[in-house]
């Protein structure tokens, strides 16, 4: 199967009677090019990012303490940045490649871009998760006790418990994030890497 030809033809088939011509070929390309799955999952990730961001805003409205607002504002800022990065990354993942471009080159570029996006998210999580966990702990303390933060911090057990909880929830959050990225993206990136290696091997064979 000529991968370059199939990739170049993807999305260029004429529509007849509401059906895309060459449907089986499109199905084959999807299995050969996991970037399509990554592109779809990026849309889901971006939607969830927007929903979570709205949730942070609602929490800041109901818990108008400057410590809580500061913490959630930091988390919200990072979240918005990564939403825009995710939207931009998704736009860079095409359903077809221009005929004048190398399919192998395109696959390498997109593989590197998605991998870097995931690494950036995981790096930021080391700083964002502790802030989010501490802010959530303070919010929970207010809600559970009915007291203001000033009263809660007069007891030494509260800040100590907050620090311990922030550390534990941060480790748990990072572990969960890695699992989620693995399910949503890494398995498709691994398949994409296999395709890249196969194309490189094929090119090398043709040259020799």
Image (cartoon, rainbow, N blue to C red):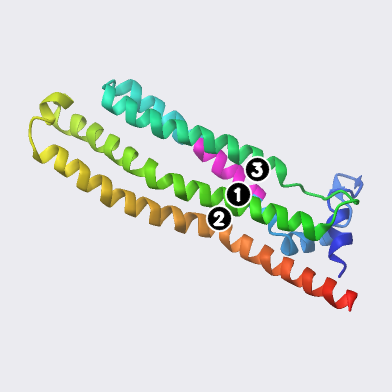
Classify 10 Å Cα crowding around label 3: few (below 14), some (14-19), many (20 and above): some
Measured as percent of width and height from the top left, residue 206 is found at: 89, 75
Q: How many marks?
A: 3
Residue sticking out furthest to the left = 155
Is residue 72 positioned above or below 42 on the image? above
Q: Which residue is mark 3?
A: 89
The answer to if 16 sits in the magenta stretch is no
Measured as percent of width and height from the top left, residue 192 is found at: 68, 63
Q: Which residue is mark 2?
A: 184
Between disc 1 and disc 3, whose residue precedes?
Answer: 1
Principal secondary structure, stretch drawn in magenta: helix
Q: Which residue is mark 1?
A: 41
Between disc 3 and disc 2, whose residue precedes?
Answer: 3
Task: Give the number of the disc on residue 109.
Answer: none
Dots 1 and 2: beta carbons under 8 Å?
A: yes
State the separation of the CA atoms marked 1 and 2. Answer: 6 Å
Q: Nearer the viewer, residue 92 or 40?
A: 92
Which region shows up in magenta? 39-49
SS at mark 3 in the image? helix
Residue at image point 46% right, 56% down: 178
């Amino acid at each position: 199967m000529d991968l370059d030809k199939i990739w170049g033809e993807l999305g260029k088939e004429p529509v007849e009677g509401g059906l895309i011509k060459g449907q089986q070929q499109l199905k084959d390309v999807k299995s050969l090019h996991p970037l399509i799955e990554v592109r779809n999952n990026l849309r889901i990730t971006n939607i969830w990012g927007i929903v979570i961001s709205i949730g942070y805003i609602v929490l800041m409205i109901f818990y108008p303490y400057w410590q809580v607002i500061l913490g959630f504002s930091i988390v919200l800022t990072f979240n918005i940045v990564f939403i825009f990065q995710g939207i931009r990354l998704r736009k860079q993942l095409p359903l077809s490649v221009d005929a004048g471009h190398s399919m192998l080159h395109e696959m390498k570029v997109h593989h590197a871009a998605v991998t870097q996006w995931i690494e950036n998210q995981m790096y930021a999580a080391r700083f964002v998760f502790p802030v989010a966990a501490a802010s959530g702990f303070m919010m929970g303390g207010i809600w559970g006790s009915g007291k203001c933060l000033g009263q809660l911090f007069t007891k030494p057990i509260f800040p100590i418990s907050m620090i311990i909880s922030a550390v534990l929830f941060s480790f748990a959050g990072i572990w969960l994030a890695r699992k989620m990225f693995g399910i949503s993206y890494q398995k498709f990136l691994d398949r994409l890497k296999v395709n890249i290696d196969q194309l490189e091997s094929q090119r090398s064979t043709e040259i020799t």
